[in-house]
Amino acid sequence: MTRALVLDFGGVISKTLFETHALSEAALGLAPGTLTWRGPFDPAGDAPWCAMQAGEMTEREYWALRMQETRALVGEVWTEFPQFVGRLRGADPASVIRPEALEAIAQAKASGYKLAILSNELDLFYGKDFRAKLPFLSDFDLIVDATYTGILKPDPRAFRLVTDGLNLPAADCVFVDDQAKNLGGAKAEGMPYVHFDVTRPGDSYARAFTLLSKGA
């Protein structure tokens, strides 16, 4: 039976910007400790993050706020997310890809599973040239990016784009996302899912493969 591992990108495949403050500060020429927002790693110290989790602001609004704050620190003008991420991540985005993600991708391929990405803003956030710097993306059978579809998770239609594109029923896919609010779309479509814990990525991937093996 053919099954599929469906991954969000930011947080699940790549490390979050919260985890790479030291790299970002070095890239921007800022003193260590300048960037203090920590999102899920310190919710009590990140009020906007808590507001986003409560549905009081969108994820894009959260990152627009952080972009505005950070550009003010360096005196630069950034109007688009790729400018922001490009400056923070530098010229080597491969350096912030989770090793656990690469292991999971290799494991999925070796097990004969299909691979898909379902992202709300892959190219919007990282820029159109980003994919060319990550050769492992060629291992994916499908990439659904709301930058182009305009259908944001948790809208169930986003998940149907995945199942239609893979020609698989939802029950034969396992979706992994670090944003709990996005999992509702998978649940509505009958797609098994894992709420990815960015503080324990290995455990989260292990749960995904457990679900995949149960359906085999």
Image (cartoon, helix red, strand yellow):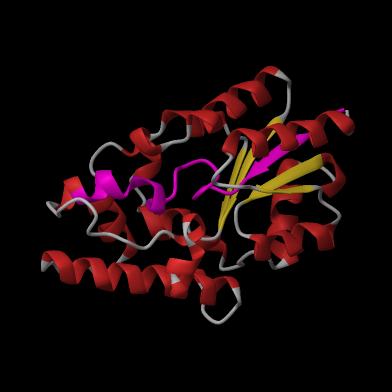
- Residue 3 inside the magenta-drawn segment: yes
Q: Is residue 59 left or right of residue 18?
A: right
Say if 82 sits above or below 80 in the image: above
- Quadrant occupied by the N terminus: top right
Q: Is residue 172 left or right of residue 37?
A: right
Q: Residue at x 50, y 69 (%)?
A: 59
Q: Is residue 187 left or right of residue 63?
A: right
Nearer to the camera, 16 or 102: 16
- The span picked out in magenta is 1-25
Say if 140 sits above or below 120 in the image: above
How many marks do you count on the picture?
A: 0
x, y (%) of residue 176? 67, 46
Specify whether residue 89 is in view: no
Say if 41 sits above or below 132 in the image: below
x, y (%) of residue 172? 84, 40
Nearer to the camera, 56 or 102: 56
Say if 26 sits above or below 65 in the image: above
x, y (%) of residue 33? 24, 54
- Residue 215 inside the magenta-drawn segment: no
Q: Residue at x 75, y 64 (%)?
A: 184
Q: Residue at x 54, y 33 (%)?
A: 101
x, y (%) of residue 196? 63, 47
